[in-house]
Amino acid sequence: MLTKQKKTKVIGEYKTHNKDTGSPEIQAALLTEAINELTLHLKKHAKDNHSRKGLLKMVAKRKKLIDYLAKEDEKRHKALLKALGIKK
């Protein structure tokens, strides 16, 4: 689970304007942080299938957001993939 400080930091890095809190870039970045934390958890607890299901849901949601951004604005899409380190 992301702490408030970590969330604020991620929002600050990916916001497109001063009051931005819900753009696809921010949502995908927050999901990426949560996915990374959950991946570390699952390396320790390999049999935690409930968390694994949540991880798969998060990955699917992030993919939908990234695909949406690809349809709307290709330039922002490529910048987001590069910033998050996601290869497509």
Image: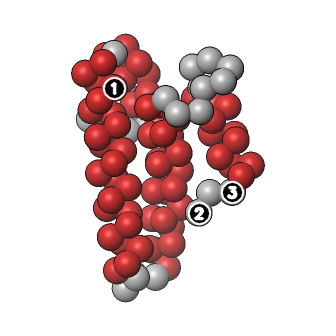
Asked whether, in this view, residue 27 is left or right of residue 4, the answer is left
Asked whether, in this view, residue 41 is left or right of residue 8, the answer is left
Can you say whether 57 is above or below 21 in the image? below
Q: Residue furthest bottom?
A: 47
Q: Residue at x 33, y 48 (%)?
A: 61
Can you say whether 42 is above or below 73 in the image? below
Q: Quadrant of residue 55?
A: bottom left
- Tell me how far mark 3 sits from mark 2, CA to CA: 7 Å
Colouring: secondary structure
- Residues under numbered marks 1 and 2 in contact, where contact means CB atoms less than 8 Å apart: no
Mark 1 highlights which residue? Answer: 69
| Quadrant, the N terminus | bottom right
Rendering coords of residue 68 (x, y %): 29, 29
- Tell me how far mark 3 sits from mark 1, CA to CA: 26 Å
Quick one: SS at disc 3? Answer: loop
Mark 2 highlights which residue? Answer: 1
- Neighbours of disc 1 within 10 Å: few (<14), some (14-19), many (20+): some
Rendering coords of residue 36 (x, y %): 49, 56
Can you say whether 37 is above or below 15 in the image? below
| Quadrant, the C terminus | top left
Q: Nearer the viewer, residue 3 or 20?
A: 20
On the question of residue 83 being in view, the answer is: no
Mark 3 highlights which residue? Answer: 3
Earlier in the chain: of badge 1 and badge 2, it is 2
- Tell me how far mark 1 sits from mark 2, CA to CA: 25 Å
- Neighbours of disc 3 within 10 Å: few (<14), some (14-19), many (20+): few
Quick one: SS at disc 2? Answer: loop
- Neighbours of disc 2 within 10 Å: few (<14), some (14-19), many (20+): few
Three-letter amino acid code at the position of disc 2: Met
Rendering coords of residue 2 (x, y %): 62, 57
Asked whether, in this view, residue 66 is left or right of residue 30, the answer is left
